[in-house]
Amino acid sequence: MSVLEKYNSVFISVFNVEASVLGHDFTSDTVDNWDSITQLSLVTAMEDTFDIMLDPEDILNFKSYLAGKDIVAKYGVTF
């Protein structure tokens, strides 16, 4: 499984969506069930999947599919 497939699988699992909906429009402002609980689930799953530990600032800024890619990349995950 590629890094992108792993990244997408976290979103698919946490938000119970199809991969086809993931993209620049997938944000905390546009996804109805993106709340504080799913935010924590998303962050925890990303940390577990990529064996990283996000800083509190990065956790707060992880508000979209695209922003998440940039944040995870800061920890050495290359897409």
Image (spheres, grey):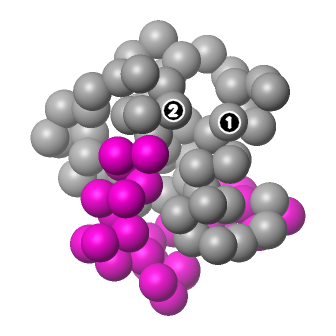
Give the x, y percent position of residue 44.
35, 46
Give the x, y percent position of residue 22.
72, 60
Residue positioned 41% across, 22% down in the render: 51
Please determine whether, in this image, residue 77 is positioned above or below residue 60: above
- Looking at the rendered structure, which numbered label has been put on residue 6? 1
Give the x, y percent position of residue 52.
36, 23
Please determine whether, in this image, residue 4 is positioned above or below residue 74: below
Q: Nearer the viewer, residue 26 or 77?
A: 77
Q: Are marks 2 and 1 in contact (CB under 8 Å)?
A: yes
Residue positioned 43% across, 76% down in the render: 34
**Residue 77, picture quadrant:** top right
For the C terminus, the image quarter is top right
Left or right of 49, for residue 16: right
**Residue 5, picture quadrant:** top right
Q: Nearer the viewer, residue 29 or 15?
A: 15
The boundaries of the magenta stretch are 20-45
Give the secondary structure at mark 1.
helix
Determine which residue is flagged by label 2: 49
Q: Amino acid at mark 1?
A: Lys
Give the secondary structure at mark 2.
helix
Residue positioned 69% across, 47% down in the render: 8
Residue farthest to the bottom, as pictured: 32
Please determine whether, in this image, residue 30 is positioned above or below residue 8: below
Give the x, y percent position of residue 66.
57, 47
Q: Amino acid at mark 2?
A: Thr
Magenta region includes residue 72: no
Q: Earlier in the sequence, mark 2 or mark 1?
A: 1
